[in-house]
Amino acid sequence: MRFLFNTSAKRIYRFGNPWCALITFLTLGRLVALAQWPYGSPTTPAAQRNALSVVRSQAGWLDNATRTAPNYGAQGADNVWQQFQALRGTYAALKQTLTPQQAAQGANSLAELDAGLDIIQEVFPNYQDAVASGQPVNSALREMCQVLRQTCAVWLQELNKCCSRLRVGWG
């Protein structure tokens, strides 16, 4: 593998051409990354506090996106969608930091939080339907953002209650 990092054209061409060398490097690099996957996320209190902090921060970013989106029209809607998906991702990462006992104890609450995100996500097709039926983009976007802001605030309150009950991040 040493010759992959050598910039000498003579050594790179051992694979036949530079593209083959790049593909081989990317493939082997991916296998190395996948080999480390089973170790999972740490379940320490510090990791849990950090993950919960990231979820709360992302909720703040989503709230900010909903406040500014009407200024950007359809591009604002795309930004809100991306921020919402990032919230889902950070929440999934938080769940990975839970200990098996916490996950078992909070299984129902966590399932309700997952379902809550699924329900909240329905605001996006509703926005698209409103625009398709002739409602002005800014008006539909303003309504969508207001609903999203309110429902995400309630979801975050429920997340905080759940994490408190499960003692997430406590030593």
Image (cartoon, rainbow, N blue to C red):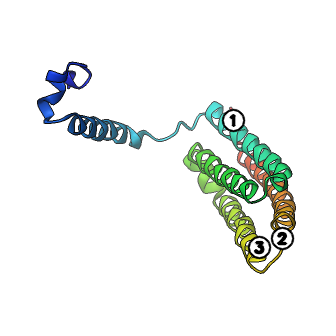
Residue type, label 1: Arg
Q: In this view of the protein, which residue sits in the foreground, 107 or 41? A: 41
Residue found at x 70% / y 60%: 113
Kind of residue at badge 2: Pro
Comes first in the chain, label 3 or label 1? 1
Q: Which of marks 1 and 2 is in front?
A: 2
* Mark number displayed over residue 91: none
Q: Residues within 10 Å of mark 1 (few under 14, many from 20)?
A: some
Residue 9 picture quarter? top left
Let me know if residue 157 appears in the view: no
Read off the residue under disc 1.
Answer: 49
How far from the left and from the top, in percent, is residue 16?
13, 36
Label 3 belongs to which residue? 131
Amino acid on which the number 3 mark rests in the picture: Val
Judged from the image, the secondary structure of the residue bearing numbered disc 3 is: helix
Q: Cα distance, mark 3 to mark 1?
A: 40 Å
Q: Position of residue 36 (x, y in %)?
A: 37, 37
Front-lying residue, 26 or 97? 26
In this view, the residue in front, 106 or 39, is 39
Residue 3 locus on image (x, y percent): 19, 22
- Determine whether 3 is above or below 94 in the image: above
Location of residue 168 in the rendering, given as x and y in whole percent from the top left corner: 69, 42
Give the mark, 2 or 3, whose residue is nearer the N terminus. 3
| SS category of the residue bearing label 1 | helix
Q: Which mark is residue 136?
A: 2
**Mark 3: few, some, or many residues within 10 Å (few <14, many ≥20)?**
some
Q: Distance between the residues labelled 2 and 3?
A: 6 Å
